[in-house]
Amino acid sequence: MRRVLPFIANPEYAFTAPWLAALQAAMPQETLVALDDMSEAERAGCTVAIVANPRPEDLRRLPNLRWVHSVWAGVERLVADLADMKLQIVRLVDPQLADTMAEAVLAWTFYLHRDMPRYAAQQAAREWRAQDYVRAQDKTVSLLGLGALGEAAARRLLAAGFKVRGWSRTRKAIDGVQCHTGEDELGAMLAQTDILVCLLPLTPQTAGIVDTQVLAQLPAHASLINFARGAIVDDTALRAALERGALAHAVLDVFAVEPLPADSWHWAHPRVTVLPHISAPTDRSTASRIVAANLAAYRESGAIPPCVDAARGY
């Protein structure tokens, strides 16, 4: 019987075939297949699967499955969906993903720093008016989350001349970055923030963390970038802050419901820039090589790579 390795995604996912091709190219010693192409005996012999937000019922068709390797960094949906299956979950940790996210953070920080939303509004009104320029070194960009993505973003922002602060669940030390932790230090950071960038993982502790209280601690001219998960920002609190002018602008790449419904208030709000979850797409080539290395090590030793801590959610 051939040994096969399934790639399992939601049936509505549009990129299953490209992923199968990329993964197969990265691990020619394996036979990559879709779940429906496996025989009953092959499904019974399968202990590991590569996944992209699969349906739990599909994974239950693999009775001896021990662990899954996600091709994405965010695994909160997997953790919730597979809570009763006792599977080990390995998330993607890809330096390319961190670099891509850092690029996006810098790009949209400059978008806000150089008043792009205001100039776009002026163009629509046929208004010719120069705004005052503020140097990058006179602005503070604060990062919620200083993991691999946050640290890469912090270094890119420092290189561009911004003052950088960061907040994380545990104390971090990054050269040139004023690092904070704890509720008291969060407030101190927010008070000095011009642009707040959210890069936190979604966990029970971070859901809704950017709420009315957090937004109220930002200066009135501050802006928000959310490149994490939609549920981290309290949507009602965000809208209220924008409506009363307590927040200058919000760049939102993630939402509680995706795709964003056509009747959502975000689309037409003059203080909101809507992005279709494009800040840091996974690079199939680099991700496939990382998955291949993890699978090769597992085949050789039987050791599962470091797994998600279900209590923390990542």
Image (spheres, rainbow, N blue to C red):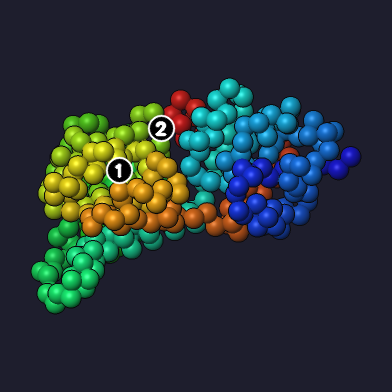
Q: Look at 29% across and 34% down and name the residue there.
A: 209
Identify the disc placed on residue 223: none
Q: Vertical placement of 88 versus 20: above or below? A: above
Toward the right, the furthest residue is 1
Q: Look at 12% across and 70% down and name the residue there.
A: 131
Q: Kindly tell me whether residue 146 is visible in this rendering.
A: no
Q: Vertical placement of 28 versus 231: above or below? A: below
- Which element carries disc 1, helix, strand or loop? strand
* Foreground residue among 264 and 310: 264
Position in image of residue 67 (x %, y %)? 64, 33
Amino acid type at mark 2: Thr
Between disc 1 and disc 2, the foreground one is: 2
Identify the disc placed on residue 144: 1
Using the rendered view, name the quadrant where residue 3 is placed.
top right
* Foreground residue among 108 and 302: 108
Residue 229 appears left or right of 304: left
Amino acid type at mark 1: Leu
Q: Residues within 10 Å of mark 1 (few under 14, many from 20)?
A: many
Position in image of residue 257 (x %, y %)? 42, 42
Position in image of residue 251 (x %, y %)? 30, 54
Disc 1/disc 2 C-alpha distance (Å): 14 Å
Residue 82 appears left or right of 213: right
- Which element carries disc 2, helix, strand or loop? loop
The first of marks 1 and 2 along the sequence is 1
Q: Quadrant of the N terminus?
A: top right
Residue at the disc numbered 2: 203
Q: Kindly tell me whether residue 82 is visible in this rendering.
A: yes
